[in-house]
Amino acid sequence: MRFGTYTHLAAAVLAAGLLAMAPPRAQATLLTFSGIVSGNSGAYVDLYYDGGYACTNASSPCIVHAGPGPNYGITFSDTAEVFLATASSVHAFASTGLPSGTGVVDSTAPFTMSFMPGYSSLSFYYASEICAVYNPCTAADETTVTILGLGVDETLTLPDALTYTEVSLDIPQAADALQFTNVSDNGVVYAAFTDIQVLVPEPASLSLLLAGIGALAVIRRRKTV
């Protein structure tokens, strides 16, 4: 094979790598909570998205409600309770404008979603009517989500949304948890969440780029020998 042919081949591989890097592809993990519950009964997400089980109770030991679920490496605190949006116990605001599935986290207490560091972005849908109840509504009343991790502590306030509204966040790679607060008062739920999606960069693009650079290095070495 002539040197020029080698060069063209290496250039093609490098170009493929650069195209893959811009924009980078991403692997998406979407949590709809739809496979956990049925009817009017709720369940606690717990370890369902870590290859474990959703529970009918918040305390240990877990009384199995559903599972095992998919192993995404994502866990929820034992306060994260999920219902069908159509359940009789769920407020009307939590069933309006659902994006895809029918399961919603409709918890009576603050809850935390934990995951391995390395995700690049995160999105979720929420509905809230807390400020419709507290009038006038202060910042202390509003639902919040806090991004947590090593050296990470960022809080976002969620305004009232009587139909499901999407929130998208770029998160630090060191982030390993989301904490949802002010979701209820005195046992009455004022906020609901669904379609939580996390994205991790696709490593294949980097591999293609390195392959192209490596091929050019081999051609350069052959030319100088």
Image (cartoon, helix red, strand yellow):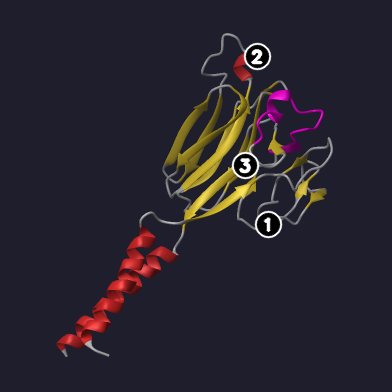
Specify few, some or many for label 2: CA neighbours under 10 Å numbering under 14, 14-19, or 20 or more: few
Q: Nearer the viewer, residue 205 or 120?
A: 205
In this orientation, does residue 6 appear?
A: yes
Mark 1, residue position: 70
Residue 52, x across and y down, in percent: 72, 55
Does label 2 or label 3 sit earlier along the sequence?
A: 2
Is residue 80 in the magenta section? yes
In this orientation, does residue 58 appear?
A: no
Mark 2, residue position: 133
Magenta stretch in the rendered image: 79-98
Cα distance between the residues tagged 2 and 1:
37 Å
Q: Amino acid at mark 2?
A: Val
Total numbered badges shown on the rendered structure: 3
Find numbered disc 3 in the image and state the secondary structure of the residue it sits on: strand
Relative horizontal placement of residue 65, taking residue 82 as reference (left or right): right
Specify few, some or many for label 3: CA neighbours under 10 Å numbering under 14, 14-19, or 20 or more: many
